[in-house]
Amino acid sequence: MGIGSYFEITPGLKVSGLRFGSKHLGKCYDDRMPVKADVDFQSGSISAEAVPTDPRRFEFTYQGKRIGVMLFHERKVTMKAGMPPVIINAVLQLAFEETDDYGFIHGLIEVARSMLRYCLQTSNAEFDSIELRGSRPGRKAYPPFEEVGSSKGRIGIARMAECHGEEVRPAFHIPLGEFEKLDVGMLQLIADGDLSMGHFVEDGKRNLWDDARCILLAASFDYEVGKLYPKGIPHRRETYAARQLIIECLDNAAEAAQSNKVRDKARDIAKQLKGIAEGGDSFSSRLYQLYKDHRDILESMRPDLDGRDDFNKMSQRVERLRNALAHGDLSVSADELNLDDMIALEKIVLAIQMLRMGLNDEEAIKAIETACER
């Protein structure tokens, strides 16, 4: 069994902050903002001017403690040959009360890693650097996840095996700093362990769709819709009345048994069926309800579909495919139409999560479009 992480800290070391750097973080927190460049091809001159930007500041709660967050651009100047003269990187900084609780610190690192992976919608993203910060400034940053620490100690976190080899080139860069609720909501849901990311795959496998990925994506959809509609999807009064009628019939059927053994068995079966009758909303009904409540979002995901009937058929196709794969029906094949459905479903899950973070329909559409463009 491999070691996932280790701690080698000088006793008494207090930590009050963490800093994270990543080239992909810079693309999420738009690195075009802090610089204005100009090229004169006739004279062969290039000029660059640093544009001051205000850091993005907010807070979230982790393990009952308030964590201050700051996103900002860090500028570096170098005269080294072969290096750009000006380097601008985005930095994520977390601040908290001084502590020597290294389990808490490790947990915060995992929250930040999950945030980066969520922003890139991939399972194998890592920061380029991490730095522990204490009461004294100037803590040294070590290489990514091999050693991270200060002059008094270090935290070592083993690289995941898939981090080696090809460079990660994600298709998504969810925009940070553009929607106030998005940044705060994202980190809070991640810190609470309340954001479904089980369907993420390695960046190099984004174009590969297998049975497991489809099933995990459908599970994420079920989870997120359950959170969006905590009381279940709304139904007409007649539907609730019909459900109540079925529940009463099941109770009466169980009590009509002629022997105690049959009655006990009937009660067990009735209990299972009542669970379905009380809140067994199907996958297709949930997706269809989402279309009725957030039509603009779903139509932006599938502009090729025309109207309610087309989306109803899509929801039924996805449900049939999910059920067949989950039950091992090898006769089912994902044709091109199913693939379009699953690609759209992946974005729909992302949109639902953004709604849970506090964005409205229009903001969620814009955020996803921006994520795909960067």
Image (cartoon, helix red, strand yellow):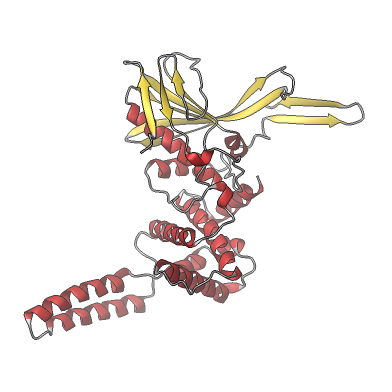
Q: Is residue 182 left or right of residue 255?
A: right
Name which residue lies at 52% across and 33% down. Answer: 127
Name which residue lies at 57% across and 65% down. Answer: 339
Horizontal and vertical percent for residue 317? 51, 73
Numbered label tally? 0
Who is closer to the viewer here, 9 or 369?
Answer: 9
Q: Quadrant of the N terminus?
A: top left
Q: In terms of image quadrants, where is residue 99?
A: top left
**Which residue extends farthest left?**
260
Q: Quadrant of the C terminus?
A: top right
Q: Is residue 240 left or right of residue 255?
A: right
Q: In terms of image quadrants, where is residue 154?
A: top left
Who is closer to the viewer here, 276 or 183?
Answer: 276
Q: In terms of image quadrants, where is residue 55?
A: top right
Who is closer to the viewer here, 311 or 339?
Answer: 339
Query: Is residue 357 at all visible to an observer of this figure?
Result: yes
Q: Is residue 55 left or right of residue 247?
A: right
Name which residue lies at 45% across and 44% down. Answer: 185
Who is closer to the viewer here, 277 or 109?
Answer: 109
- Relative to 22, does residue 149 appear above or below in the rendering? above
**Which residue extends farthest front?**
1
Horizontal and vertical percent for residue 211? 48, 62
Query: Is residue 52 at all visible to an observer of this figure?
Result: no
Horizontal and vertical percent for residue 26? 61, 35
**Which residue extends farthest right?**
42
